Amino acid sequence: MSSGTILAVVTLNMERVSGGTPIFFAQNEEEQERTALYLAKILDAMTHDLGNGIYVIVRH
Amino acid sequence: MPVLLPDYLSVILYGVLAGTLARIIMLRIDYRQYPGYPHGYLTHTALGFIASALGAVAVPAIFKPDYVAVTFLVLAAQQFREIRNMERRTLESLERTELVKRGLDYIEGIARTFEARNYLVMGTSFVTALAAQIGGLPAAILAAFLAIMVSFYFMSGEIIGDICEVVPARLNFKGSILQVEGIDIINVGLKSMREKILQDGLAVLIKPVDGNARATIHDIGQRMAMAFTAAVVMGTKKDVDLPEYTPLARKNPDTGEVGLYILPVEKDIKQLIAAVKLTPVLESARSKPLDARSNLRAVVKKVNRPG
């Protein structure tokens, strides 16, 4: 079983995330959804919802 | 004794015929048992022919008697181990570009099966040749028929339908987590994907009938094999940029039941149930913890003995 890698983070709240992964800030949920979808398509990866306004793009 | 030569020739011929016939019949079933398997009809028929020739030649060698000649069967075994390696290599190299993975256990299972087939063919041709040598053509036909029957018995392994009950299941989301009858499958972040999954997805619940079956479907390789078979039979909407649609099988840690989720091309729950039931029980996954119980009890008694 391979483990996933976090490729990017899409957040509504810039103060809740930091670190070495690319972070994308979205103004609202609609923009967040769209950015996450585009990133997932570009990176051939999957979007996961952490439930606190943060999406992570993970390659499995 | 040159006079006997034609006799031996016919003996070998009957053996070879029976063996090759057995291999051809088995091939048809092989491909039904392992759908989505890259076909190599000619290769396997040719190898079956060689195996049956080896089996058949053993009989005149014994009757001659030329016992040294029988040792070439050892060489044959070596040769057929090579078949297993060949199958494994082919499937492993295909695995890299496979959207829905077979899993290493399944590959090993197929490779072993294809090796074992040749031993069955060798046995069939040996028995047929022996009968031909002793009882002539009628005996050979009877022996060939019986041997092919026995081969069938040995080759038709257990399937999931024998050890588990497969029932339709409900797909739902708890927040962003996809669930099959309460079993967590995967976190799906995008709302559009969630809607699509609820609309087009199918799910089944695989209930083991006893502890042995529970241990078998606990195996990751076995679960991958079920998801793979389902994806081959039903088709899947998964693509490189759509990892959300990967068919997945996860277990309920408390009951050992397995929930399987798939996004099929055609939404037909009956066919999905049939596909899951058809999945062969992998040799590497099959375990029988219930059979170990009595030994376990003896050991526990020994450990707990006072003094």
Image (tube, coloured by chain):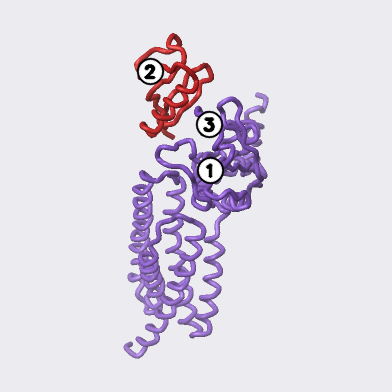
Distance between the alpha carbons at the discs numbered 1 and 2: 31 Å
Residue A43 spot, x, y in % from top left = 36, 31
In-image side of B280 versus B100 (left or right): right
- The residue that disc 2 covers is A23
Tell me, yes or no, whether the two marked residues, 3 and 1, touch with CB atoms within 8 Å.
Answer: no
Q: Are marks 3 and 1 on the same chain?
A: yes
Distance between the alpha carbons at the discs numbered 3 and 1: 14 Å
Residue A12 spot, x, y in % from top left = 46, 15
Colour red, chain: A
Local secondary structure at mark 1: loop
Q: Are marks 1 and 2 on the same chain?
A: no
Distance between the alpha carbons at the discs numbered 3 and 2: 23 Å
Note whether B15 is above or below B237 in the view shown.
below
Q: Quadrant of the N terminus of chain A?
A: top left
Which numbered dot is residue B186? Answer: 3
In the figure, what tint was chain B given?
purple
Q: The residue under label 1 is which amino acid type?
A: Leu
Q: Residue at x 33, y 87 (%)?
A: B1
Q: Residue at x 43, y 59 (%)?
A: B114
Q: The residue under label 2 is which amino acid type?
A: Ile
Residue B249 spot, x, y in % from top left = 55, 39
Task: Between label 3 and label 1, give the one nearer the viewer.
Answer: 1
User: Which residue is outermost to the top?
Assistant: A15
- The residue that disc 1 covers is B263
